[in-house]
Image: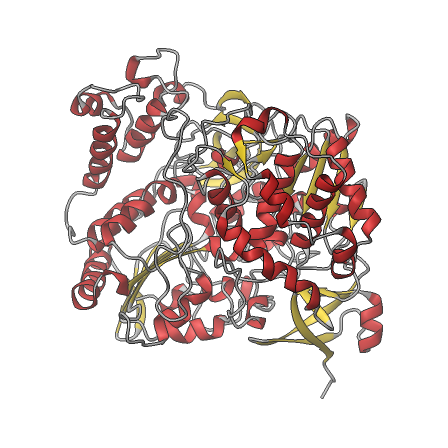
């Protein structure tokens, strides 16, 4: 007999509510939950394929431990014994920084990934920390940190109320949004136009998003910051700056005016391949709109000036008075955020508190560039030890980082490697221990990170739809045991990790004058927590201490886990609202519009006007049915238009003697790949496009379907030397490449 169960989709940032159909313990169908307070029944192909993702026969079901050079099935006890010996041995011999940690994108899609990595990193004390953020979004974190004092204070467009939306380097119709959590992004764009609003898209490709636009500008890749700087110039030049109610909260306006004085539309037009009149029109339209928002994403982050571009997105929102007002760009407030502190000066945001050992890359947000991982493993220096042990969670940097071939070789030189991952993939095949989490149907779900980026405040939680099958271990327990094994507490009860965090959090909360539990007994408060598991008790604590919480009885109508469980479709917390100055943590307590690191980097942007690349440049692309390197092993989500092809403009194809479907060789600084050509005028002249996340052709993996159509690894064209200097983000777009037809033998 079939039954249904609710589950929040973990397969992209949209976080849609699903209704699963379950036969026994198998998910046989998924549809949108019409009563979900956020997604209201919307579903995309990934969500519709939840059952296939959940039941993929290539998912690992038991731990693997390397014995005599081969990965073999083992017990959980054997696996954690090996982890304790391997990680602690390296720490004791070489120190904590010799242990590297790599966190992949899927970590932020799970409860375990939201609750335990910080505990692991704190317990290890390592500075060798790498995440997917430095091949994706770190420029936005850095610019937000410098502007607002908090790297996680990221304003999002108020999609439901704005009258003018300018997207740059973003394709949310196919990506479902990124650093902007919005269920049914396509529907929201259509609603914008239906209410008379305007959509402008700046992108070198005519994406599905661009096809909806009132104005599509096919900019030269990598010149986003120049265009935005010129728009900023126009606002000052034509007297269009109007901060409105923001004025008391902003400093540095005059300094920005002086800083952009050389970036006239006429001076940047040739570099951007956008005429000066169009640039002026963009600025005027933005300033004239009653409400407006500028939103930039991966395309504008993964370029040489990613942080400057991300900064200018917010500068434009600020100078037009659209930051922190309805219809503009607002700061969401998640239910599990910390108790809001009173407005006032904070500690600010610092860059470069330490540096990578080999190339001396500065840290950003506590992380080093993922591009530097290979050299941190395979290169000895007089300063410190190379990384000798590696912990990875939901990460596949062999595909996602530049020069995967070098990293592939470097991983073989480690003393020890442990991976939390459901697959034996291009990276985890090197591990000495693989700890497989259960499929998503067998896990609880709450979105910690994505609710801080949601276009409407809401909170949802779903318990496992299917009980843990025998022999499985919850991902939260896997992480807790990993923390214990890696920090010298192997064998302790995993509940000790949750108890420690609860004790520390409540102990701090009762000392904060603005906390609802100030002055109370933390042990008493801990005893009031509800939930069936340690993670649920932590979620209950976070909800109760959070901005909407019951404060452990202080606000009886506030949030708690019990109240949330009573609302299985979620609780709507209302539209985004103005919050300044409370979110600001800068030393001044204001938006610091021209931070010194930004000012110091602007001359580099000015010099780029004289450094235009000759020949073809490369950009990536997204597809609705995949997410980075995920889900290529799911037959229902591959094939058709979701293929690894090199998109090339007809005029470029004709010049090179390339026909549609021909094999073409693409060569970059890091190597070369061969892919089929897709001749299309959907990409501008001078630009070619390969999708990210492919290249499933390495031996020793267990990705049966992906291996049948592996595609090529676009990041192998990069040698890892091109980084945005402020954020350490890899430069993946606007990279010069050579393209040639493959002559049949």
Q: Which of the two residues, 719 or 599, is positioned nearer the viewer here?
A: 599
Q: Is 177 situated left or right of 480 in this image?
A: right
Residue shown at 53% from the left, 43% from the top: 50
Q: Quadrant of residue 74?
A: bottom left
Q: Which of the two residues, 358 or 739, is positioned nearer the viewer here?
A: 358
Residue 347 in the image, given as x and y percentages of width and height:
36, 39
Residue 531 in the image, given as x and y percentages of width and height:
29, 27
Q: Is 173 situated left or right of 722 in this image?
A: right
Q: Quadrant of residue 502?
A: top left
Residue shown at 31% from the left, 43% from the top: 476
Q: How many marks?
A: 0
Residue shown at 73% from the left, 79% from the top: 740
Residue 120 in the image, given as x and y percentages of width and height:
28, 49
Can residue 304 be seen in this snapshot? Answer: no
Q: Is 141 situated left or right of 543 in this image?
A: right
Q: Residue furthest bottom?
A: 745
716 relative to 45, above or below? below
Q: Quadrant of residue 181?
A: top right
431 relative to 35, above or below? below
């Amino acid at each position: 007999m079939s039954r249904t169960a609710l589950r929040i989709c973990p397969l992209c940032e949209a976080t849609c509510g699903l209704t699963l159909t379950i036969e026994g313990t198998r998910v046989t169908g998924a549809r949108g939950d019409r009563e979900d307070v956020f997604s209201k029944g919307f579903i995309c192909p990934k969500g519709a394929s939840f059952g296939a993702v959940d039941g993929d026969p290539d998912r690992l079901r038991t731990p693997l431990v390397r014995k005599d050079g081969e990965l073999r099935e083992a017990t959980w006890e054997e696996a954690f014994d090996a982890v304790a010996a391997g990680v602690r041995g390296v720490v004791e011999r070489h120190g904590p920084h010799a242990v590297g940690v790599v966190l992949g994108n899927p970590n932020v899609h799970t409860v375990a990934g939201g609750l335990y990595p910080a505990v692991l990193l704190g317990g290890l004390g390592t500075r060798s920390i790498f995440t997917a953020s430095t091949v994706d979004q770190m420029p936005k974190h850095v610019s937000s940190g410098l502007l607002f004092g908090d790297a996680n204070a990221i304003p999002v467009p108020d999609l439901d109320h704005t009258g003018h939306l300018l997207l740059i380097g973003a394709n949310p119709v196919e990506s479902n949004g990124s650093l902007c959590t919005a269920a049914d992004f396509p529907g929201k764009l259509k609603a914008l136009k239906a209410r008379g609003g305007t959509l402008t898209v700046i992108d070198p490709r005519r994406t599905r998003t661009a096809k909806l636009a009132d104005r599509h500008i096919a900019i030269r890749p990598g010149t986003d910051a120049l265009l935005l700087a010129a728009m900023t110039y126009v606002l000052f030049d034509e007297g269009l700056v109007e901060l409105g109610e923001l004025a008391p909260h902003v400093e540095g306006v005059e300094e920005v005016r002086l800083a952009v004085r050389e970036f006239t539309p006429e001076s940047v037009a040739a570099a951007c391949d956008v005429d000066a009149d169009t640039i002026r029109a963009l600025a005027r339209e933005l300033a004239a709109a009653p409400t407006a928002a500028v939103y930039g994403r991966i395309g504008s982050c993964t370029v040489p000036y990613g942080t400057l571009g991300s900064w200018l997105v917010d500068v434009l929102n600020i100078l037009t008075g659209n930051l922190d007002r309805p219809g503009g760009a607002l700061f969401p407030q998640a239910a599990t955020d910390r108790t809001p502190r009173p407005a006032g000066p904070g500690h600010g945001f610092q860059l470069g508190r330490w540096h990578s050992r080999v190339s001396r890359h500065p840290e950003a947000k506590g992380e080093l560039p993922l591009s530097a991982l290979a050299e941190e493993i395979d290169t000895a220096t007089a300063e410190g030890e190379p990384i000798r042990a590696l912990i990875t969670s939901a990460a596949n940097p062999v595909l996602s980082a530049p020069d995967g071939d070098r990293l592939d070789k470097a991983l073989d030189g480690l003393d020890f490697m442990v991976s939390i991952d459901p697959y034996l993939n291009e990276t985890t095949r090197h591990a000495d221990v693989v700890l497989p989490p259960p499929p998503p149907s067998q896990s609880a779900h709450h979105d910690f990170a994505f609710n801080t980026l949601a276009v409407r405040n809401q909170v949802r939680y779903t318990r496992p739809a299917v009980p843990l099958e025998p022999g499985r271990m919850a991902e939260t327990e896997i992480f807790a045991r990993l923390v214990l094994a890696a920090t010298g507490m192997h064998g302790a009860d995993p509940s000790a990790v949750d108890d420690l965090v609860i004790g520390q959090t409540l102990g701090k909360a009762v000392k904060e004058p603005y906390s609802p539990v100030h002055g109370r007994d933390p042990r008493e408060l801990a005893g009031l927590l509800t939930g069936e598991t340690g993670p649920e008790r932590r979620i209950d604590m976070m909800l109760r201490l959070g901005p909407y919480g019951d404060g452990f009885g202080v606000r009886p109508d506030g949030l708690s886990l019990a109240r949330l469980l009573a609302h299985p479709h979620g609780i709507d917390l209302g539209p985004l609202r103005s919050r300044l100055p409370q979110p600001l943590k800068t030393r001044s307590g204001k938006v610091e519009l021209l931070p010194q690191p930004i000012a110091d980097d602007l001359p580099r942007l000015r010099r780029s006007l004289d450094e235009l690349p000759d020949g073809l440049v490369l950009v990536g692309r997204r597809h609705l049915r995949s997410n980075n390197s995920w889900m290529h092993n799911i037959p229902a989500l591959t094939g058709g238009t979701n293929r690894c092809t090199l998109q090339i403009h007809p005029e470029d194809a004709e010049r090179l003697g390339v026909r549609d479907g021909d094999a073409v060789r693409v060569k970059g600084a890091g190597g070369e790949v061969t892919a089929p050509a897709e001749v299309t005028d959907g990409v501008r002249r001078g630009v070619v496009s390969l999708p990210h996340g492919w290249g499933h052709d390495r031996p020793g993996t267990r990705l049966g379907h992906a291996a049948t159509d592996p595609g090529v690894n676009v990041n192998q064209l990069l040698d890892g030397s091109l980084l945005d200097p402020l954020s350490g983000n890899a430069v993946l777009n606007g990279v010069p490449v050579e393209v040639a037809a493959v002559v049949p033998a």
